Image (spheres, grey):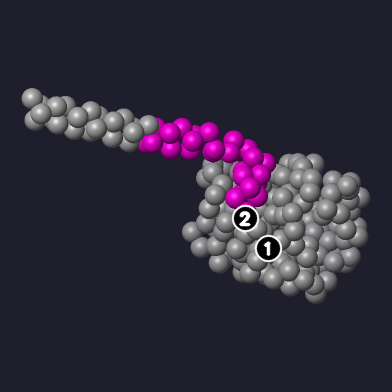
């Protein structure tokens, strides 16, 4: 009788362990589904809650750049973008930024195909910028002239608003939302680390 009681107690203990394991497994799976961000904004918020820090400055509020970039050719899978803008006629500072962005793009390795570079020269400066030379030096970079006033209007009221005398980089999501910006004083390695982080945790669409 005692032996039978011990067996029954062991069986119940084993059943409790099985149920506990099942509850833990399904709980983790459910939590994973609930935590997956549906949009880039939700993903950014989740990363901030987790204590993730960016090397660049956050564009706050996020800026929609569809008005400037929406006419660019889009492939089947929209790409992240490093957008370069500002400067006086693509001066030496601008040239340095473009070269730096090219090197960063190359250093992304296998993830480089998920990113494209875009240069937004001012329409007023086209007569002093050698576009053909730029395209020869940067054959895979999209060049799309914009009005300075249009760019200012898009950035107005955000933390990325500036006088455009110097050249800046912007990180833009596949949905054409500017989320980070970098000045010429930022370390290029910081942009590279941020891009690696963003590409790692964003859906590969």
The tag on residue 150 is none
- Residue at the spot 57% in from the left edge and 59% down from the top edge: 196
Callout 1 touching callout 2 (CB < 8 Å): no
Circle 1 packing at 10 Å, graded few (<14), some (14-19), many (20+), is some
Would you identify the image quadrant in which residue 91 lies?
Answer: bottom right
Instruction: Return the mark for residue 55.
Output: 1
Is 198 above or below relative to 30? below
Which residue is nearer to you in this view: 107 or 128?
A: 107
Q: Residue at (58%, 38%) from the top-left corner? A: 37
Q: Position of residue 29 (x, y in %)?
A: 43, 35
Give yes or no for residue 49 being in the magenta stretch: yes
Q: List x then y, in percent, for residue 15.
A: 25, 29
- Dividing the picture into quarters, in which one does residue 124 lie? bottom right
Q: Secondary structure at mark 2?
A: loop
Foreground residue among 30 and 38: 30
Q: Residue at x 73, y 69 (%)?
A: 186
The picture places residue 108, in percent across and down from the top left corner, at 55, 62
Q: Which residues are magenta?
A: 24-51
Residue placed furthest toward the front: 2
Expressed as whole percent of the image width and height from the top left, the position of residue 200 reads 53, 53
Which residue: 14% across, 31% down? 6
Q: Secondary structure at mark 1?
A: loop
Determine whether 132 is above or below 14 in the image. Answer: below
The residue wearing badge 2 is: 52
- Main SS of the magenta part reads helix
Looking at the image, can residue 142 be seen?
no
Q: Nearer the viewer, mark 1 or mark 2?
A: 2
- Quadrant position of the C terminus in the picture: top right
Image quarter of residue 192:
bottom right
Crowding near pointer 2: few (<14 within 10 Å), some, many (20+)? few
Q: Is 114 contained in the magenta span?
A: no
Q: CA distance from mark 1 to mark 2?
A: 10 Å
């Amino acid at each position: 009788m005692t032996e039978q009681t011990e067996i029954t107690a062991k069986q119940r203990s084993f059943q409790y362990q099985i149920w506990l394991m099942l509850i833990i497994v399904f709980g983790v799976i459910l939590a994973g589904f609930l935590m997956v961000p549906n949009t880039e904004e939700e993903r950014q918020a989740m990363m901030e809650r987790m204590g993730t820090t960016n090397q660049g400055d956050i564009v706050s509020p996020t800026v929609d750049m569809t008005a400037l970039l929406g006419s660019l050719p889009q492939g089947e899978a929209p790409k992240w973008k490093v957008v370069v803008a500002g400067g006086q006629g693509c001066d030496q500072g601008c040239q340095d930024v473009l070269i730096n962005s090219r090197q960063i793009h190359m250093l992304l390795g296998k993830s480089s195909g998920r990113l494209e570079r875009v240069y937004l020269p001012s329409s007023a400066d086209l007569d002093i910028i050698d576009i053909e030379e730029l395209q020869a030096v940067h054959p895979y970079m999209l060049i799309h002239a914009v009005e300075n006033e249009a760019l200012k209007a898009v950035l107005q009221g955000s933390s990325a608003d500036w006088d455009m005398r110097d050249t800046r980089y912007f990180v833009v999501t596949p949905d054409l939302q500017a989320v980070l910006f970098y000045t010429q004083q930022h370390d290029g390695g910081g942009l590279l680390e941020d891009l690696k982080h963003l590409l790692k945790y964003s859906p590969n669409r």
